[in-house]
Image: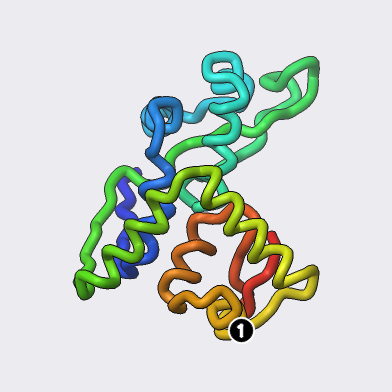
Amino acid sequence: MLRTKVVNDSTDLIPLIRAFDNPVKKAVFKEIQVEWKPLSDIKDRYGDTGEQALELFDQMKLVETKWTTSDEGINGRPQKKYRSYYSAFNINISCPVNEISEIFTIASLRKADFAELENEIAKFIGDDGKFSNSVAEEFNMTLLALKSIVKRSEKLGFKGLKIIKN
């Protein structure tokens, strides 16, 4: 089935960039575009990095999943199978240069720098979360930069206008 993911929000570029930022993620996605692949096959071939790629794709809603039967599973236990949900992307974005530069700056932050910022924000919002305006003010950043950080993060998410821990 051919499905196209439409991207029309500039900050949605960040998860897409992250989804294909290393050779293992690209290879895993290529494999699941062809047919349903069980987790064990991906893990045997690509190790924990392959499993993490599938988890990221699932979080981003780029894959669909289903459970195998006990017979198809491992040691009589069912396992998840994955297949790409989309066969194409339609990216239609128009935004000012300063916005796109801010988005690409967040997307290209070194892993260690991003992790430090992500942890500081997670500590600030606590277990109850905080409204995005308060977080942006605390860290002296624009709402666009904050939204970009949350889109890149595996630890943070949005619940309405609040930023929460996943």
Q: Where is residue 44 in the image (x, y as percent from the top left)?
A: 59, 14
Residue 96 vs 81, above or below: the answer is below
Circle 1 crowding by C-alpha within 10 Å: few under 14, some 14–19, many from 20: some
Q: Residue at x 43, y 50 (%)?
A: 109
Residue 125 vs 13, above or below: the answer is below
Q: How many marks?
A: 1
Which residue is identified by label 1?
Answer: 134
Secondary structure category for the residue under label 1:
helix
Residue 78 vs 98, above or below: the answer is above
Closest to the observer: 113 or 133? 113
Could you tell me which quadrant the C terminus lies in?
A: bottom right
Q: Position of residue 3 (x, y in %)?
A: 33, 51
Could you tell me which quadrant the N terminus lies in?
A: top left
Q: In the image, 67: left or right of 19?
A: right
Q: Position of residue 92 (x, y in %)?
A: 21, 65
Q: In the image, 84: left or right of 45?
A: left
**What is the three-letter code of the residue carrying label 1?**
Ser
Q: In the image, 12: left or right of 39?
A: left
Q: Quadrant of residue 69?
A: top right
Q: Is residue 160 something that shows in the picture? A: no
Q: Quadrant of residue 135?
A: bottom right
Q: Which residue is drawn at 39% across and 38% down?
A: 21
Q: Is residue 23 something that shows in the picture? A: yes
Q: In the image, 94: left or right of 155?
A: left
Closest to the observer: 121 or 29? 121
Q: Where is residue 117 in the image (x, y as percent from the top left)?
A: 58, 58
Q: Residue at x 40, y 53 (%)?
A: 107
Q: Residue at x 61, y 39 (%)?
A: 66
Which colour scheme appears in the figure? rainbow
